Amino acid sequence: MGHSHTHNHHHSHTSLKGRNLLISIFLNIIITTAQVIGGLLSGSLSLLSDALHNFSDVISLIISYWANKLARKKASLQKTFGYKRAEILAAFINAASLIVIAILLIVEAVERFANPQKIESNLVIWLSAIAILGNGLSVLLLKKDSQVNMNIKSAYLHLFTDMMASVAVLIGGLLMKYYEMFWVDSVLTLLIALYLIWMGFDLLKQSTKVLMLFTPDNIPVKQIVNELNNFDSIKNVHHVHIWQLNEDEIHFEAHIDFNKDITLSKFDEILNEIEVLVFKKYQINHVNIQPEFGKVDAKDVIVQD
């Protein structure tokens, strides 16, 4: 059996992600505290609501930060994969919470639309502007990593949505101050909630696929099997499993029936060719092959274990 591993500057980059998450946590604690105090002083339900959203961001960021630290822990006899799936699990939890928060936002928006309240708009305007700056900085810190990491993406979406919610509060505050258009806040909140459900559901679906060991959407199993079956020395490729362990690792496992009773050194040569092929074409970086010769077993590509 053989394995190919491809690693780069993962550890230093992971540390950088952890630092950015920690900065974002502190920023959101400050924002949440200021908005709670401001909401109580002004009587603004929307500001208190935004404070609640920011508090949920703090929780999601702590989960992401904790998962980021866990993912760095080494494997052991009891945890042979280590905690490599911690970030995927965090992404799943945060994505689910995004959808729950969005539903609560919709309920809140409908209630507020039916019963608009006059509030102290000046304090709302200033505190929402501060929240936009704080969340905006956090969004910038996490944007790059959010494109390649589900855990960071879940935290990024929480922050981005809360920044947009703060924009809605700011716009609502300005319109209430100058035009007394109290209904605008509810409409903007509703639109943000719908966007949140759309993004949150997509992330929830992605993380669920990884946790369920589904084959990544961009991996053509039949095509890989056909390419390996074209090797002169290979008679049949069967009992295939392809799954994504985390953001960095895609695993390929298969039984290969050979035409001849080859030596171990010859098997190593063929294994190396397989590893190079699947890595260059499909970014599969962990290969585990069980060699067989004349073994009587199921030869289907997918075999129910």
Image (cartoon, rainbow, N blue to C red):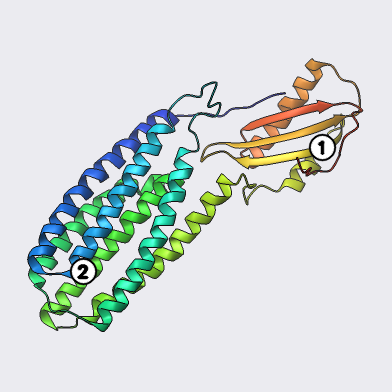
Identify residue for label 1.
237
Front of the two marks 1 and 2:
2
Which quarter of the figure is the C terminus placed in?
Answer: top right
In the rendered image, residue 40, in percent from the top left (x then y), is placed at 11, 63
- Assign a secondary structure to mark 2: helix
Residue drawn at (41%, 32%) of the image: 70
| Residue plotted at (26% across, 45% down) | 24
Given residues 120 and 5, the one toward you in this image is 120
222 sits to left or right of 244: right
Residue 129 position by quadrant: bottom left
Q: Amino acid at mark 1?
A: Val
Name the amino acid, label 2: Ser
Mark 2, residue position: 46
Distance from disc 1 to disc 2, alpha carbons, whole Å, reads: 60 Å
Q: Residue at x 29, y 36 (%)?
A: 19
**Is residue 296 among the parts visible in the rendering?**
yes
Q: Is 176 above or below relative to 266? A: below
